[in-house]
Image (spheres, rainbow, N blue to C red):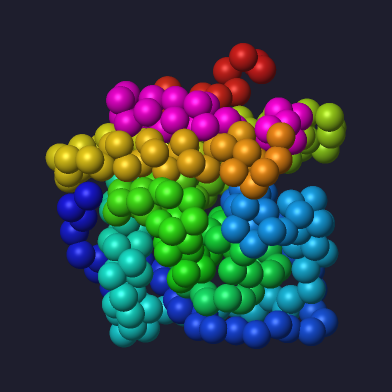
Amino acid sequence: MRLDDFDPDSIDVEDQGRRGSFPGGRGGQVGCGTLLIALIGALVFGIDPAQMIGGLEQAQLPTREASATDGNSVNEACTADANRRQSCNALYSLNNTWEPLFAAARIPFKQPGLRFYSQAGNSGCGAAQSAMGPFYCPADGRIYLDTDFFRLMDVEIGATGQFARDYVIAHEYGHHIQKLLGMSDQVRSLQAQNPRRANELSVRLELQADCYAGVWAAKNRERLEPGDMESGLNAAHQIGDDTLMRNAGRRASPEAFTHGTSAQRVRWLRRGMETGNEDSCDTFADLR
């Protein structure tokens, strides 16, 4: 995907660097992307997802407020390598795509931040650990990205290509859109009211974020290159709950799905890419 170079004064990016473990402190909630990466952890690192998710929910890391970023620090964070630069370009494009849509709808908009970390870091939702991969923290409105995750995508997951990486950022940005629209809070309320449907509601939320990622791609269709759509759809397939479970040597258990099957993820990403209409991303329509 041919994206414009980011404007360092127009995006909120910080590099947390490499961090060790932090004793004590305050635990936080798990971000929207964590459950998926727990399954990736099972595939790549041999981690039991249930244990990992439980451990993350009880993570004891101090939460620090990130310092205000300026153009120089953004440039340093974004230009350390090609993957970071592309992530910052994608963030810049996502801001420029979604902010006018919110303005047209007269809905308040606030750009999300992007925080790079290596191996371990911290967020407003608690721990940021390498096995978690990318996640969005609704508590502080930031996307967290382990700098080694894209290598994992290529080598361990088989989700190759630049647009596959753009899709990851766009999906997490989709969770920010859900927060701004109040959808995330509504889902959490419904999950609390009916815990038996918690996973089903999580799947609907994740599929909507996939669709929003597709909408962003569609609204920048002139920047797509040959093979981009296939790269994104392959990534969506490779991170479906059923595919991750089977690749981890486990039986695909629908009752344990939290992000959707490969077929569902591909279908909703494709819907966003084909329609370019955010209104087509209502994965909750039949609940109303």
Q: Percent x, y for residue 267?
A: 44, 25
Q: Residue at x 25, y 68 (%)?
A: 7
Outermost residue, front side:
249
- Left or right, 268 with reference to 53: left
Whether residue 273 is visible to the viewer of this picture, yes or no, is: yes
Q: Nearer the viewer, residue 187 or 266?
A: 266
- Could you tell me if residue 258 is visible in this image? no
Q: Is residue 211 magenta?
A: no
The residue positioned 68% from the left and 63% from the top of the image is: 125
Query: Residue 247 appears at what percent x and percent y?
Result: 59, 44
Residue 246, image x and y in percent?
Answer: 63, 38
Which residue occupies the foreground of this view, 189 or 240? 240
Q: Position of residue 114 (x, y in %)?
A: 46, 66
Q: Residue at x 50, y 83 (%)?
A: 17
Compared to residue 253, the image places residue 58 above or below, namely: below
Q: Is residue 265 inside the magenta stretch? A: yes
Query: Along the line of sight, which residue is nearer the eye, 125 or 133?
Result: 133
Magenta stretch mostly in which secondary structure? helix
Give the residue drawn at x 59%, y 69%.
130
- Number of numbered discs overlaid on the protein picture: 0
Residue range corresponding to the magenta coloring: 252-276
Asked which quadrant contains residue 72, the reply is bottom left
Quadrant where the C terminus is found in the figure: top right
